[in-house]
Image (tube, grey):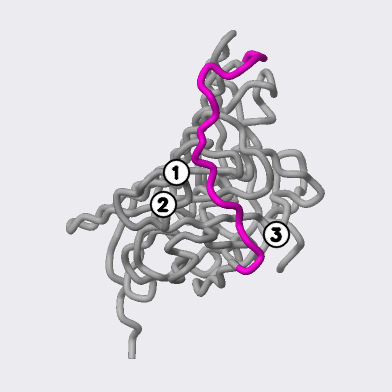
Amino acid sequence: MSDGAFFRRLTDDRFLATDHTEGPWSPGAQHGGPPAALLGRALERVASDPSWLTARVSVDILGPIPVGELSVHAEVLRPGRSVELLSAELSAGARVVARAQGWRIRTVPGDPVVPPTPDAPPPPGPGDAHEVGWPGGYLRAIEWRTVQGGAGAAGGGGFGEPGAATQCGAEPAERSQRGLWARPRLPLVEGEEMSPLQRVLLVADSGNGASSELPISDFWFINPELTVHLHRPADGEWICLKARTTVSGDGVGLAESVLYDRRGTIGRGAQALLVGPRKPAAE
């Protein structure tokens, strides 16, 4: 079953995931990006004031999220005049498969206290399209482009090729980093326009793939959580991930991403990783 969106809305709180949500780790299980964005949508809809900025979202993935029918519930945990804490829960039948919490901060009109960052990444060029070799419908439902003029654009790089991600911004990188621009080809929910927060959450969960240190054919590096901090809303359709992964010898890793739009940095993402070798196929 495939439609022209990641989800079809059945009722106000029930959704049907399409094949475009499927991730690379297990057939029939979603990539973390679409459910994270769906939880972000729920947080926005229950918020007291839509003009406030969602400055932090933390998503806990409690188990495989099936490509099928899901229900969403959201509530305000801690109301306030300047900040509020929101919570959302995603269920497949009677099983809760993911939870999210978001802090929203009151915004005030006027000039920014700190000038905008000057390190806006080069925009994605028409010839920089990156073909994703990983399985799953989600990665094909996102348009990926390498950074113009960076190491990734000149020497390849991207999903499925080990190495941290090439430089997106103007500041020197401590090590080789891979920069990937990402733009959804489809709406999150059929018939709806995505908000800036939904766009960020839809792609921020791909930091571990953009900066994979190990080949996906031999290893898995699955994140049970995603945390995103934002200091301003994303501007435009494209989001850039400047990501790198650190893997320890004890089966634990950390993927870190600096998030950009065309104007510069918008925030950061982080994912704790469960790392291990894939079992050889039975003969």
> Which residue lies under the disc numbered 2?
243
In the rendered structure, are the residues bearing label 2 and label 1 in contact, judged by CB atoms less than 8 Å apart?
A: yes
Q: Disc number at residue 258? A: 1
Q: Would you identify the image quadrant in which residue 249 lies?
A: bottom left
| Viewer can see residue 226 | no
Q: Is residue 45 magenta?
A: no
Q: Main secondary structure of the magenta part?
A: loop
Q: Is residue 124 magenta?
A: yes
Q: Is residue 278 above or below residue 208?
A: below
Place of residue 42 in the rendered image (x, y in percent of width and height, measured from the top left): 64, 35
Q: Secondary structure at mark 3?
A: loop
Q: Farthest bottom residue?
A: 283
Of tags 3 and 2, the one toward the viewer is 2
User: Which three-letter amino acid code belongs to the residue tagged 3?
Assistant: Arg
Instruction: Give the CA separation, mark 2 to mark 1.
Output: 6 Å
User: Which image quarter holds the C terminus?
Assistant: bottom left
User: Which three-letter amino acid code belongs to the residue tagged 1?
Assistant: Val
Which numbered disc flags the more N-terminal residue, 1 or 3?
A: 3
Q: Secondary structure at mark 1?
A: strand
Question: Which region of the structure is painted magenta?
Answer: 108-127
Q: In the image, what residue occupies the spot 21% across and 55% down?
A: 248
Instruction: Give the CA separation, mark 3 to mark 2.
Output: 22 Å
> Which residue lies under the disc numbered 3?
185
